[in-house]
Image: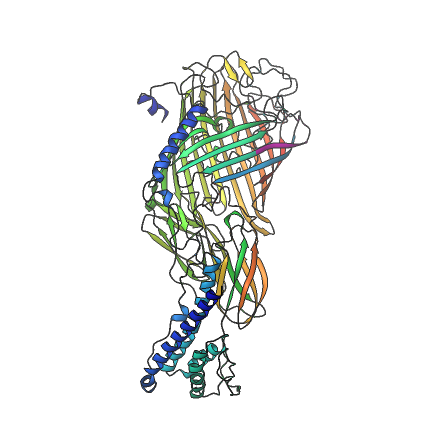
Amino acid sequence: MTTRRNARGAGRTMMAVALAVTATAIFTGAAAAMAAPAQSSPWLGEDLPLPLTVKTPQDLAVKQVAERQYLIFNLLAGGKVAWDAGDFATAATKWEALLRLHPLDADIERVIRPLARDARGRAGGAAAAVPSGGGTAAPAAATPVAEARPVVVSAVVSGTVAGGGALGPGGAVVWLKRVGGETPRPTPAKGKVVSQRNKSFVPRVLAVPVGSKVDFRNEDTIFHNVFSLSKPNEFDTGLYKQGGSYTQVFKKAGPVQLLCNIHSTMIGYVYVVDSPYYAQADGGGAFMIRNVPPGEYEIEVWHEASSKEVHQKLTVGADGVRGVTLNVAGDKRAPAFVPDKSGKPRQAQVGY
Amino acid sequence: MVSAVARVGFQPHRLRLTAAAFVAALVVAGVASVARAQQPGGAGQTGGDGSDGDDGDDGNGYTPPAGLTPPLQLNGYIDVGFAKAQGDGTSFAAGDTRLPADYAVDPFAPAVNSRGDVASNDPGGRLTNGFLPRSVGIGGRPSFLINTVNFDLKYTAPGTPLLIFTRLQILPRFSSSGDQTRPYLEQAFGRFIPFDSQELAISVGKFDSVFGIEYLENQANLRTGITPSLMARYTTGTSTGAKVFYRMQLPALWSAVSLHVAATNSGNFVEALQSPDASLTGVPVLSGRLGYELNRPEVQVKLGASGLYGPRNDQNQRDAHQRVVGGDARIALHGLYVSGEYIRVKEEEGGPKTTGMGALPISSGFEARAFYAQAAYAIPVDLGPWHKLTLYGRYDWRHAWFAGFTPITVDRITAGLRIDVWDAVILKGELLVNRELAGAPTVANNVWTLSLVYSW
């Protein structure tokens, strides 16, 4: 146990040192860049998802640690990219956000704190009062001023969905809606795909933000059709053969049941979310919503086996919220007879 | 199609698709499916795309691991009714004492539920032949009814193209005496889909009719209204045998053509007691439907032509044939659903008639022409659990006669209202106006009936 803890601690230190070394190396080579004309090279790392498999609680723990280090690195490097581009306000904002993380490795704090102060100064404002992130550096002495740009801290909301009957909680769609304010409109997602494979929809459940395009692709050797009677997102792809595809834009929030007019056993769902803060539970029910600004929210859950959506109040602080527990009912069974395009029930055992 | 079958020289042979044959067919299908599952890339290797069970918030969606969906599915319904028929619940005019009452009850018996059970049969016991509907035995008294308790068991063998389906029903009033409840195996078959790339399905066992379209909604939880049409007794009976369904898509036309053919022990007539499952003549009855469907998003059209040919299976003479031909059409357009069907029935005179009622001295020749047209309009509702209101109406007409008897022409006007609550409850109410147009005295035999169907 001790060995494991030591190993974990050593790993964390190594990671922090590596990050600090990386940052230092970046800065060493960046001296000229500071003087050179600003290069426009936006840091895209913050928008990239981490394709980590999460199937067990251990996987989730690994993912949480990785997410944290990922965030640290993004703030660290994103600040540097902004610095290089001469956008000192952004650099200061990112680094100040970084310094607010707790705990934060001392090496990182030692390197970044003076730079953050310098960036804020170059941006024309006084350095924000950034408490120590747990490192050994002294707290910043600067006093915040009214004109200082507000620092937006994005937190993580994570937890577990339970229930879902025989299907289990996997696929549950979890999202946050602001209470007492307007939820930002989400950016439509790109590259979303639902395949028809082995006479099934893959994935079976897909969550997308409002306005997203979903590509329906036929990977079987037979014709398929995709249609939905779910108002107000009803649509019909017509028939298309292997390799064919059809793109549908989902403009309204809510569940969209996917059916095939040829194969009555095929059923799937797209859930259209009207919030940028959403996630889907994995097979074990674990979910994680990133980049959530602190505030009051209602957390909502939809699951194909639940007749009602779950609503629950949630307060998100600067450090986010971990261990949210949500329960979905398993009271809604798969339909015995799925409808055809006209809404008439089809008996799967008859014919095809 | 019937004559075409005759021209190609179908050689009758003994075909007794008994339970043993059914089991044997399932074994064959099972062996084939196991072999198929062992092929690389076969259906047994279905699974995720790397996103199975692990999608979280990475935006690629979620697909449950193989095996999470239970292969065994149990569904069913309970149909509870309330009905009131005019008069004494039969279609006999007061003082009509004609003998023999060979065809008395059939043409205008007042159906009161989704099974087509009538309020009452002739109380005088004069019936000597013909078709005897089941009776709920309530006369003209308003009464609550238990119509059907239905269990559907569906088993999809994991990784195989094999489906096993059984429909077991608990039927009150199974016999004509009106009060004997019995379990009834309405359907039991295995369905095998041999090719991934073709819409071809082979079924063996006891299954639904393939004739026409009314069998598709011959259960209370599937039927738009309550009562079956006047012609349902000629087209919706289940039988034992083998059937093949094939469909070919025509994507450029948003269309498909299909062929559904069956060889069964008996035809699709519905009797007071089902016709015997066993073949009484040793010669199968052939039936089939050729269909066309247009599946545009805004309108769906389905057309079909059906035929049935073979020996009557209510007697044992092979040369006493039954022939049925028909056409059907369905159109769905913006919540409006219109359907219709036409048939011609001809049954040649045969030997002693055998039904669950026992042996009768002869099986009379019989002919009928009938059609119905039905329209239903569904209105979406968003009032709590109430989500749909459907108004429907149907017109039925039938002209039929037994050899040697006066043809009788009747019609029926049905108007009804249906309310869908949650996904599990249907409340339906309808009025049936039964009219004797020719060949029989006018009888007060209209019906009010309600049905509450709870599905699980």
Q: Main secondary structure of the magenta part?
A: loop
Q: Is residue B1 above or below residue A272?
A: above
Q: Which of B286 and B302 lies nearest the eye of the viewer?
A: B286
The x, y position of residue B255, in whole percent, is 36, 43
Q: How many marks?
A: 0
User: Dividing the image into 4 quarters, which one contains the C terminus of chain B?
Assistant: top right
The x, y position of residue A97, in whole percent, is 47, 77
Q: Is residue B86 above or below residue A223?
A: above
Q: Is residue A201 magenta?
A: no
Determine which quarter of the picture holds residue B358.
top right
Q: Which of A337 and A199 lies nearest the eye of the viewer?
A: A199
Q: Is residue A27 visible?
A: yes
Colour pattern: rainbow
Magenta segment boundaries in residue numbering: B132-149
The x, y position of residue A173, in whole percent, is 50, 58
Q: Which of B128 and B357 lies nearest the eye of the viewer?
A: B357
* Left or right: where B255 falls relative to A159: left
Q: Is residue A213 above or below residue B209?
A: below
